[in-house]
Image (tube, rainbow, N blue to C red):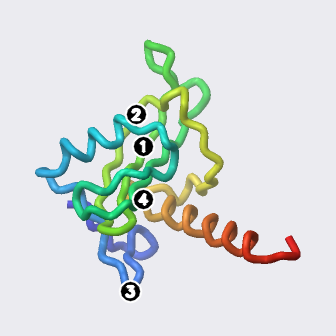
Amino acid sequence: MNTETSEGQGVAEPDEKPWQDVPVEYEPAWRAIFLASREGLNLSAPCPVCGVAALHQWYSLGQPEDVNLSGNRLGGLWEWCRACRSYAHYSAAVPEWWANDLQVNPSRLAHHPTAIEQARREREATRERTNADPAV
């Protein structure tokens, strides 16, 4: 089980539970949702584990020379639900359609998506403040 609790790495906020592997009985539905989506960072489908529309995915590109025999770019993939905190992490071929401007410090990346979720929340909060400020 991926319930990271080491300091600064995957520690749940006081009101959040720790990250957990996608329960095995939900893996087929989980994989089907993510494989079918080309929505980018935020998916509209509900989480098969908890039913909340809170799914996200994020690819991290490797080095430019990291390609497989088919010419696909290689990197890491995180899939997670911010509501129930289920997640999966893979080494993956980064699809050609993937384009995302979410900046995450590579030194903070771990198996769990804590750093990515924090960056996503910070960007969302910044956008909300910008949209709420009539002077901007």
**Disc 2 residue type?**
Ala
The residue at 63%/72% (across/down) is: 125
Q: CA distance from mark 1 to mark 3?
A: 26 Å
**Disc 1 residue type?**
Leu
The residue identified by callout 4 is 113
Q: Nearer the viewer, residue 29 or 90?
A: 29
Label 4 sits on a secondary structure element that is loop
Q: Is residue 134 above or below residue 85?
A: below
Q: CA distance from mark 4 to mark 3?
A: 17 Å
The residue at 57%/52% (across/down) is: 106
Instruction: Specify whether 53 is left or right of 124.
Output: left
The residue at 75%/70% (across/down) is: 130
Q: Position of residue 78 (x, y in %)?
A: 41, 49
Label 2 sits on a secondary structure element that is strand
Marking on residue 14: 3
The residue identified by callout 2 is 92
Q: CA distance from mark 2 to mark 4?
A: 15 Å
Q: Would you call the spot at circle 4 few (<14 residues within 10 Å), some (14-19), or many (20 or more)?
A: many
**Disc 4 residue type?**
Pro
Which quadrant, please, contains the C terminus?
A: bottom right
